[in-house]
Image (cartoon, rainbow, N blue to C red):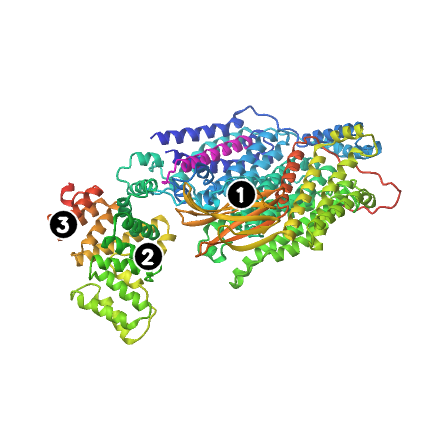
Amino acid sequence: MLFWILVAILTAAVAVVLLLPLLRANARAEAPRSHDVEVYRDQLDELTRDEKAGLISGDDAEFARAEVARRLLAASDAVKTSETRTSSRRVNRLAQLCIIVFLPALGLCLYLTTGRPDVPDAPLSARLANPGDDPNILIAQAEQKLAKNPEDGAGWDLLAPIYYRTGRIEDAAVAFDRAIRLLGPTPTRLGGYAESLIALSGGLITTDAQTALQKLLVLQPNDPRAEFYLALALKQDGKKDEALAAFNTLVAQSPKDAPWLPLVNEHIAGLKDGAATPDTGRQAAESAPGNPTSDDIAAAETMSAGDRRTMIQGMVDSLSGKLKEDPANFEGWMRLVRSYSVLDQKDKAADALKQGLAAFPASGAEGKQLLALAAELGLKPAGETK
Amino acid sequence: MIIELGHYALVLALATSILQSLLPIFGALRGDRSLMQVGTTAALATFGLVAVSFAVLTYAHVTSDFSVQNVWENSHSLIPLIYKYSGVWGNHEGSMLLWMLILTFFSALVATFGRNLPETLKANVLSVQAWIATAFCLFILLTSNPFARLLPAPGDGKDLNPVLQDIGLAIHPPLLYLGYVGFSVCFSFAVAALIEGRIDAAWARWVRPWALAAWTCLTAGISMGSYWAYYELGWGGWWFWDPVENASFMPWLAGTALLHSALVMEKREALKIWTVLLAIMTFSMSLLGTFLVRSGVLTSVHAFATDPTRGVFILAILVFFIGGALSLFAFRATHLKAGGLFAPISREGALVFNNLILTTAAATVLTGTLYPLVLEALTGSKISVGPPFFNMTFGLLMLPLLLAVPFGPLLAWKRGDLFGAGQRLFAAVGIGLLIGGIVYYVEHGGPIMALFGIALGVYLIAGSLTDLALRAGLGKVSGSVAFRRLKGLPRSAFGTSLAHMGLGVTLIGIVAVTAFETEHVVEMKPGMTTEAGGYTLRFDGMRQSNGPNYTEDSGHFTVSIGGVNVTEMWSSKRLYTARRMPTTEAGIRSFGASQLYVSLGDAMADGGVVVRIWWKPFILCIWGGTLFMIAGGVVSLSDRRLRVGAPSRAKKPKKLVLEPAE
């Protein structure tokens, strides 16, 4: 309300300023060329001054004086012959009306189509003092804390997957790396680090990524994701036989209905055919549930905020769909709950939490982790929200 | 609420601009005084409203209000405060708002200080100014709104482009825009005069201070931009003939021509039509520059074609104003009375010569800038017109102009004595050749063209001093009388002298750097030494440090001469964390007017680092000269007195061929 009052005051003040000359008593317009006469008189005075100061010779001054005097005469004649006119009352009224109507009309019409009167100011200091449930501020706050105290491993651990999901892959790689160095390696951190590196290099399994994946396998033998990427690394290196062996081992270890089997079999078929397709981990990363592809990430960097949000939303929805088909994916549920929370969709996050708890009961270790995440994000299971 | 008020103020500014573009000119047509006076109050109101909206955008940047898209895209919470301010105009939307602010500022100046203007002229000028303001305000509101909001607000900004995080770039755009947009006043005066169909000496008197003020600011802006590019980009160059630079250089060339022809028009009432045309062309060049820089057409014609909204809008503004003004000119020019007559050899003649060369030079730069764009649009092949083209064409054009500069002020109005002027310049030529020879000897083995270039520079300086000395009658009258006469000289004489002297100083800098600079690219390990410009540089090692929003690797160098340590310097590379963008912070040390310039390259695996070291003799003269030019502009501007060109009588009665001015 205050805003509209101020808008009204501003408009009225400007209207008054514009109306002032029209409200004054009708003055006669000056003769059109009277100013020229002044200028030429000034020039003649100047000439006399210069002559006295000895800057120009007497003859030269005479010449110049004659020239200026000719212009002066012409200008004075024009002043005498020009007619003066007064303004008409009718035109004056019309102009007043024009100002009074036009100013608020155009101002409001244009403002209401382009402005956002409903959006309040959001200076950063105020938002930081009272973050509420603003996920962006929570991330920013965490970042600022980390900038002051870069040795806080838990902070990096928390931010890393969020960065990865929101397309800030470089930041994700740095954060995973720091978390590993400060808190020690876990399969999740190592896997996240390796996937960030792979995404950064456009699908190429770099040496650093391979090292991370090998460490992961030490901690968690037979991890299918790590084995798959390492097999792919062999294929990228051109070591076809070893790659084939590695893929075959992966198939042998996997359950019959594992979702990655079709992709692995495709690679095996490709290797057997000898068709050395220049393969990268790109497809692999795409097939992992809910992962952004490297194209997506590249696109996200050049996107506007709105588009980026749409893209992230799309990725999250696809993850949700995959989880409906295959609910036995604990990491997927954790990711889904977190994503919805970051996207500020509390209902969906609560819903996902409920479905996740259905697959992993609250009494189990995984269920407890889900509940802990919910507490951290300020969520309650859907059933309790109302 | 504050943000939205700023937005509303901008919308209201559009409304007042529209009223200002209609009511005063209508009043001028009808001879209605109160309608004409609406122009004055409307100009002040528009300026006030734009100032409010600019202040609000600044507030949003300073408080890091990321709910404003412009702030989110171009600021960061950790950035130092000064760059929160300069971030306001360090981006497209904000810089257009600054453009608008300066445009309305000049309108307000005309409204306030234009009391001595004829009422109808003032009303017309304010209306024409308002047309421009309306067009740009619409452009801002419809295609580049700085007040667009983001919901939900992001947590932190994307940071200001790191190369813009520099004090030079905080000052450069406002100065440049003061210059660009200052010429809009000259443009408005020209169009207003064409509408009234009346142009005379008095008109030139009113236009000249505006042209002078705009020219001074533009000179300062270009000079600042060039120095910034020199120390920030780390390539050691000071002028790249880059289209963005050319965009600001073309109005400068045209503006310089305007300044000189307005002089002729004021003193002698000659060159009227030409001056009006120049006033139109100068601002057209400014508009063209704005179009080139702001539409994205420079990055690639195709990038422009994929999102043409902004570009097409500015192009429409460009076509409307340039086309409209030139049509008006074509329609009215024939009705204008031709002015005073003068002989080819005279001060007027010299100024015409100056005008011809400056406009040809501007056309050359225009060709070199637009040719690649046209070619890309037509054939799709991307070429770049580089420094060789410009150096060849522009350099050759400038040569006769520079030779003629000292003659101009020495020639009398109406008809002059070239031989006499030449005789009087004899001393200047002598001094020029002498000092040129000394420099040649000191720097041994410099190419002969450099010798000539330095001589030309010194000749320019000595020539401008000759003018002052002759006017004071030095040598003819006693010392005290000469000093009194020197003091009595009009300030514009000192302004002319200073500006021409500055040209000489800049020329010396350019020639010396081009001919005598040395460049070494060496891989250095800590403890290694290398030579440059007679100094010995020792690389001491690298150090890592953190800035507020960047990390920095700096190399430390000790500079010594003959085993004695003279100074030390740091040269560094920064990585700005938010954008992950590296910048070079070159290490620069001045020795007199010369500089040692050290730029760090890539680190090698074995602990060494690639270092580029330049010795730049007399480089500071380039920008020092522009300081003289700026001082000349300011001094001339402070001369409120009006000078009248007094024709000198022909010494011998001989038949003179008089030429019409146009």
Which residue is at a point 40% across and 39% down the rendered structure image?
A111
Q: Which mark is residue A197?
A: 2
Which badge, 3 or 2, comes first in the chain's sequence? 2
Q: Nearer the viewer, mark 1 or mark 2?
A: 1
Local secondary structure at mark 2: helix
Same chain assignment for discs 1 and 3: no
Front-most of A222 and A112?
A222
Looking at the picture, which amino acid does disc 1 mark?
A: Glu
Q: Chain of mark 2?
A: A
Q: Are the residues flagged by discs 1 and 3 in contact, CB closer than 8 Å?
A: no
Q: Are the residues flagged by discs 1 and 2 in contact, CB closer than 8 Å?
A: no
Q: How many marks?
A: 3
Q: Which mark is residue A365?
A: 3
Looking at the picture, which amino acid does disc 3 mark?
A: Ala
Q: Quadrant of residue B458?
A: top right
Which residue is at a point 71% across and 35% down the rendered structure image?
B494
Magenta range is B39-67
Front-most of A213 and B104?
A213
Q: Chain of mark 1?
A: B
- Residue A230 coordinates in the image, percent (x, y): 27, 64
- Residue A366 coordinates in the image, percent (x, y): 15, 50
Answer whether residue B20 is visible to the viewer in this image.
yes
Q: CA distance from mark 1 to mark 2?
A: 41 Å
**Residue that mark 1 sits on:** B568
How crowded pointer 3 is (Cα within 10 Å; few <14, some 14-19, many 20+) is rated as few
Q: Is residue B459 magenta?
A: no
Q: Nearer the viewer, mark 1 or mark 3?
A: 1
Local secondary structure at mark 1: strand
Looking at the picture, which amino acid does disc 2 mark?
A: Leu
